[in-house]
Amino acid sequence: MAAGKEDRIALHRLMLVTRELDRVIGAADGHWHPALGEEGVVAGCYYGLLEGDALVPHYRGMIAACYARGGDLRRLLAGLDGRATSYSRGRYRSDVCGPIELGIIGLYSGALGPTLEYAAGAALAAKLDAKGAVAVAVFGDGTASRGNFHEAVNLAAVLKLPAVFVCQNNQIAISTPAQGEHGGRIVDRAAGFGIPGQLVDGNDVVAVHAAVQGAVARARRGEGPSLIDALTYRVGGHMAADPGAYRSAEEVEQWKQRDPIALHEQRLLAEGLLDAARAAALREAVAAEVGAAMKAAQSDPLPGPDVLGLDRVFAEA
Amino acid sequence: MARLTMQQAVVEGIAEEMRRDPGVFIMGLDIGRFGGPLNSCKGLWEEFGAARVIDTPISEGGIVGAGVGAALMGKRPIVDIMFLEYLSLVLQQLGCDAGAMHYYSDGRARVPLVVRAKFGVGPYHGHAYDYHAWVAHLPGIKVAMPSNACDAKGMIKAAIRDDNPVLFLEHMGLYHGAREEMPAGDAVVPLGRARVVREGRHATVAAIGAMVRRALLAAETLAKEGIETEVLDLRCTVPLDRAAILASVAKTGRLVVVTEAMKFCGAGAEISALAAEEGFGSLKAPIQRVAAPNVPIPFARNLEKLIIPDENAVAAAVRRAMVA
């Protein structure tokens, strides 16, 4: 399931978009949860799914996931502070919840974990339809401590659902490091569920993409769910405004040396898929696209009282 | 037509909807070959097979969550969580998330999910708790509680066709009780419409679930005393049939609200507040609430009996309203 030339450029581009989103949004909103350093997992998971697949993203990387699914960047960014042009017209936040019309099941509350069960349900719907669709769920290592993780993966295993569970394992949950969260490796839990588990270098976007697409192909063949543990590192704070004073600067510095974007770009340059000029042009184009979308979104109107919709809580037949 | 118990009526309603719509399926614990606890799904597995009558692990949060996910993708799942006392295990998925999805998505997400749960003090010792007020408080989820077999069939059909999450409550004290003739054809009882079960002009008793029968027994006793009681079967607490409650109160001027659920912050408080806020002009006496006290349901049969309103408690409340 190796990525072709175009895929490798597209993966690079999606990582660049993810990082630029962090830079631009983080500067505007201290509560934004950046995916700095985790772009390899974000792009590797969200690139390459098909129409009809359900995508259940982790909140850290949600906007990039929606963008990868064809979402309009201006509308997605307008949802950061609830503007009328956003997909929900201001009824909900876009930083943790993408639009259902893109096949995305986001977080409809602040509770992490239930979305993995929604992914199992989307996979069950896909199984009943038998058209080869899958559900891909991405979650953090912190979320993996929740019972929801165990119930969702176990249910998917028992019912042999076409689901792929990917842990975006940045080795920290807000301030609690991995050793304070798990008694063992997350990937090893796969054996307990009787499904394949794969540990992958989350800072190698091509490796993540290959692992996810391999598991997706398996699910499409009706062979059941998989668990992927994509090991990466949260270089930024939990939120943009978090200085991360609870961990060592040396550790952060070490991981910065394994920056997923730099690693992949060097590989593209070495393989001749990109030259220095094209690499720079790509960065500039991404910065221009994100910058323009953000600028436009920030001047979009806030919703009028008509959006409140007190009589729109229930769906009509 | 066959005469059915509430249990049989619910199963028949589900079977009709499964025949009608291939997107309807049901999952839960021990609902296949075993037939579900108290035969809650008896016969479905035999007719529809394991692909649409899905036995699951003990994982209430997991299966209700999976129901939410499948509903978002266009299916009409029914999830049998056995007993309402497991509601605490599924509140995030059912109440907080599923109830908000339609609104938060600006109307694009629909969650046509039915969660079935048995409850109620009755012949089966345990699992009795009526916690439905937890969900009634949350936006976007309907709560249905039939009081008889006919309504149970018509309401489960309406719940399955509804595009919103519905908590469907099946009272164990009524489950294998009175048989009723089912109406012919595709009889759907819309959610949110109360029914006047007995007409009267002196006092309204608004009741729900197993309390409807007790209200009727009380009304018979009161009739002998010259008090004509109107008995309203609310059928649902969400949507609440506000118009029916207010219309009856306008007619009688007296309101007694009867619930098996605990009194404090229970559905009875909301119904009383509605009458006080919007029907005060017609009230001739203070509103009376008859409900279980706020105490965990005790185990011994005689203690259990002491906390659940019976027909004598209902009649006494009506008499209090009459003298006030």
Image: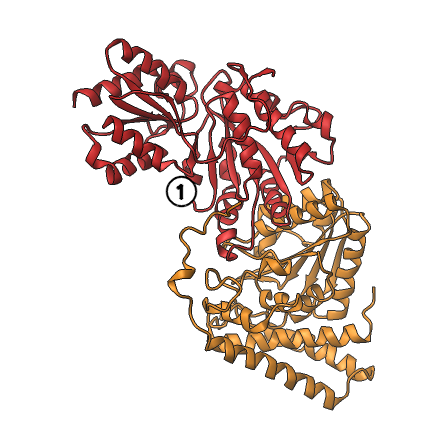
Chain colours: A orange, B red
In the image, residue B31 above or below residue B182: below
Decide which of B25, A2 is in the foreground and name it: B25
Question: What's the residue at 54%, 56% (across, down)?
Answer: A107
What residue occupies the far top of the structure in this picture? Answer: B224
Q: Amino acid at mark 1?
A: His
Q: Is residue A47 visible?
A: yes
Q: Residue A15, image x and y in percent?
A: 67, 74
Decide which of A255, A227 is in the foreground and name it: A227
Decide which of A104, B281 is in the foreground and name it: B281
The chain identifier of the residue carrying mark 1 reads B
In the image, residue A158 above or below residue B253: below
Q: Residue A78, image x and y in percent?
A: 50, 71
Q: Is residue B264 visible?
A: no
Q: For mark 1, what is the residue?
A: B137
Decide which of A94, A150 is in the foreground and name it: A94
In the image, residue B314 above or below residue A139: above
Q: Residue A142, image x and y in percent?
A: 58, 56
